Amino acid sequence: MSHQETRLIFKHIDEEGYTNDIDCYVKNGGYDQLKKAVTMQPEDICAEVLTSGVRGRGGAGFPAGMKWKFLDRKSGKPIYLICNADESEPGTFKDRQIIHQDPHQLIEGMICAAFAIQAKLAFIYVRGEFFEGYKILERAIEEAREKNFLGDNILGTGYSCDIIVHRGAGAYICGEETGLIESLEGFRANPRIKPPYFPAALGAYQCPTIVNNVETLCDVKHIIEMGGEGFAKIGTPGNTGTRIWCVSGHVQKPGYYEFACADITLGQLIYDVCGGLKPGRKLKAVIPGGSSSKILRADERFTGKLKDGTEYDWGIEDIPMDFDSLMAVGSMSGSGGVIVMDDTTDMVEALANINYFYAHESCGQCTPCREGVPWMRKVTQRMVDGEAREEDADLLKSIADQIAGRTICAFGEAASWPVQSFIAKFKDEFVEKAQEQAARRKEGKETAEATTLI
Amino acid sequence: MTIDSVWERMVATIDQLGDSLRWRTLPEKGVALDATAFLDLGFVETKNLKYDPAAFKEAHAAPVEV
Amino acid sequence: MKIESIVENVTINIDGQDVEVPKGINIIEAVKMVGKGKEVPHYCYHPKLTIAGNCRMCMVEMGMPMRDRATGEAVLEEDGTQKIAWMPKPTIGCATNASPGMHILTGSEMVKESRNGVTEFLLINHPLDCPICDQAGECRLQEFSAEHGRGYSRFIEDKNVKPKRTRLGPNVTLDDERCILCSRCVRFSKEVADDDVLGFVDRGTYSTLTCFPGKELSHNYSLNTVDICPVGALTSTDFRFKMRVWFLKRTHSICTESSVGANTEIWSREGKIYRITPRRNDEVNDTWMTDTGRALYKEIESEDRLVHYTIEGVHKASGEAAVAAAELLKSGKIAMVGSAHSSVEEQFFYKAIAERSGAKVSLVSHNGDGDGLLQSEDRTPNLRGALVTGLISELPSENLEALARDINSGAVKTILAVNEDLTELGISKDVLAKAKVIYVGSHANRTSEVANIVLPSLMVFEKDGSFINQSFRIQRFKAAIPGPLGVQPDFTVLEKIAAALAEREGYSDDHRLSMGAHGSDN
């Protein structure tokens, strides 16, 4: 059984002969939607985006049209558009492909969006490690400027907007939208408190600002092409458009696959699209939306009612890949990073890896995250180093509970959810770890084998 | 001679102190005295944390009782 | 005198009680205002700094009246009362502003649990060196740990290690391990002192407070960072390891550095001052004071302190010296060089002495550059007092050249000098030798050395009195420590002189009346 991808955003990614210069892009119909967009009323574009139901592709899944509606237009201050290209959620590698292989799609989407919200200036905040991507974007923007798709008096419409590419200073927290704004302004990427600093009212330079993910901004181009209603036909109500699933881990064919929302189940994605697991291995768990989303256990049954009232009773393989279904099973589609783990995975080590990452990336501004996340790292590190205690599982859970919901930004949740879900679903392994080590210690053996944490 | 008896004498002769002020019962945060008699002196202070000579002069030139 | 700005009040509900608070006030302040001693615990919030919201200690539960999305009508409970939509997560009180109908819980299970969590987190990497920490006894972390802590530690890992004694500037030493990264000091330097020198380096749990490269915390307000530091991270290099704060007596006083008149608190024990800190007065100094103002008490023990009443160099009792001074002042051709450092009470008597002796009064200005904050151009605490008491009616002059001319011409034969070294103000030693000098002051100088009569005076820390500041605010100070043995409060001696002068032949009854009906009462 084969499953056909719906390649909308990734239409030309990896296409033979497709290059990332403007000529190739224009030859393939590029900038036609911009030409169309500038003939429309800005508020009509906003309405189309709202109708399309497109949800943010950066992680939170908040409807983009709604976000735009929150813009404070009465302040009289300039409006800014920022493209969040600080892709750094472990397990996610989609925006990078767009930037490298089809940068003009992003630029066209951005100018359409900028025109729609009447932004005075637009920024691309690109992850610092994307050296090549930065160069590609700079060149692409220069090309677009030369053709007057960008800059003063775009296509003779009287609307002017430019895009500034800003390279991030290399921290995960720069992807948090208010941290990103701080970083863009030249400060440490310490997220701002909300209220009062909601970007739509008090964003970059205290002006109304919209921050959208790369993929979301690309979607804007396609919404203009097919209209809000046309776009909404892809996927299911409330879960419109396509998602790019970045599959990594213990599958035969890891990679990025674009499907319409709910067009495919998690099982189909793993077994049919990605060629299944290595021979002789069994599925153990899946993290479906980047490392911060809650882990799903292979033998779980997921039952309950969806938002529309329909009841569901799914095994892990039956879960439709869309926003609401993954939320219904207690996790999230997040940034689309699907991390597959087979039965060779040591869950304590896996969590130690994740904790290491989040402890390293905490900005250190607010207490629960600054102190709690490194504590969790120290605990899991000690466990894999051979000093596990049976009570550590409960301790980890308790620390995570003291962080989630108490922090300035969503990093607190991002760091706690893995711990909470790992303990909720694999507590026995954490306890066994301690028992095994205790048994080996009794026999006078080394309690832990050498492990390599990434 | 105590500070209280000094104050009994002071309030008897210094108009700005009024009748009711006494050292022992002076509020912790002090009391603003009537400065109208001195507004035309060219004090050297410029604006600082809580004092703005122009605003001070203006506020005291046309005193409004609450 | 001023019309109070009209503040709109709103009704909010705190822990089940409807209360009226000014609209927009934050929940920490609202609870402080109406909570009858109840407090929302906090570290990073400071009433005079911007909101940072980083300590997460001031968590409260917040709910708003529920309204129907479509119709905007109030949604009611079954019993007809307004239904409250409670936020699923706790919210920080410092950044939550009172709006009509807001409901707040300051002691719910969720609130307690999040405070306990924050407390545990702040303690895991804290060195817990309270026994040697200067902040002990006035440490918010210590206080809240007692109230919200577990009492035991679940943390068995290694603690982070950070620098223990970093010199941030001439007055401040930093212990980074104790720092809870509340950023009060960073915000103070940036927002109040306007000298943005502090910041954090490194990330996450390794975040460390430091000065920017090549910079120092050397502005004249650096010790305020020590005051507002909620823990023992920023310490006063001067006060460090000197004294446990709970042994110290606190006395309200006024800073004499300039005409600002910052409200202060003197911390003393057994007649010795250990430190001076600012006392909040929103009309004068908010919660700040200068570093230089805090060091003024050091002059108490200076070696040139005047501690004896003398006549022609011979030690005398205070009464004898007063009588001798009065006799000298009766001889006519008197000039008085008063002082804006004297208290209002002292100036009141100087005025009487001047009147009764026919002395011509001059004051000398002591001006410097103003810093735009709490150090004004006029470096005296009580020039307005000299005006209000009528000691002078014009602003002080820059020097005493006019007086020097009067001495030379023989128009002035006797000078009563208060706190001023006349030889530095245009009167040479030779000229001064032509006149008799009575000197009143706390410290020796070239004038006191040649004075015929010396009356030692107490410093502000040693006496009761009042000053009138630049905005004509009369403020009280109290004696924190006893003065040098045998030295009387200045006004006691001055009153004796004034009384003796009142007996003077030919002194009109009108003048006596103007001194009040009480006359001399001792």
Image (spheres, coloured by chain):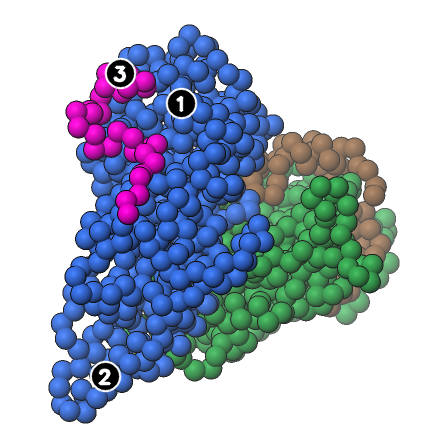
In this rendered view, identify the residue nearer to me: C109 or C362.
C109
SS at circle 2: helix
Compare residues A264 and C191 and report the one nearer the observer. A264
Chain in green, by letter, is C
N-term mark: 1 or 3:
3
10 Å neighbourhood of mark 1: few (<14), some, or many (≥20)? many
Chain B appears what colour? Answer: brown
The chief SS type of the magenta part is loop
Which residue lies at the image location 51% right of the left edge and 29% below the top edge?
A229
Dot 2: chain letter? A
Residue interval drawn in magenta: A1-30
Amino acid type at image mark 3: Lys
Q: Which residue is drawn at 36% across and 81% down?
A: A391
Q: Where is residue C118 in the image (x, y as percent from the top left)?
A: 47, 67
Q: Where is residue B8 in the image (x, y as percent from the top left)?
A: 80, 60
Residue C274, given in percent of the width and then of the height, sits at 47, 69
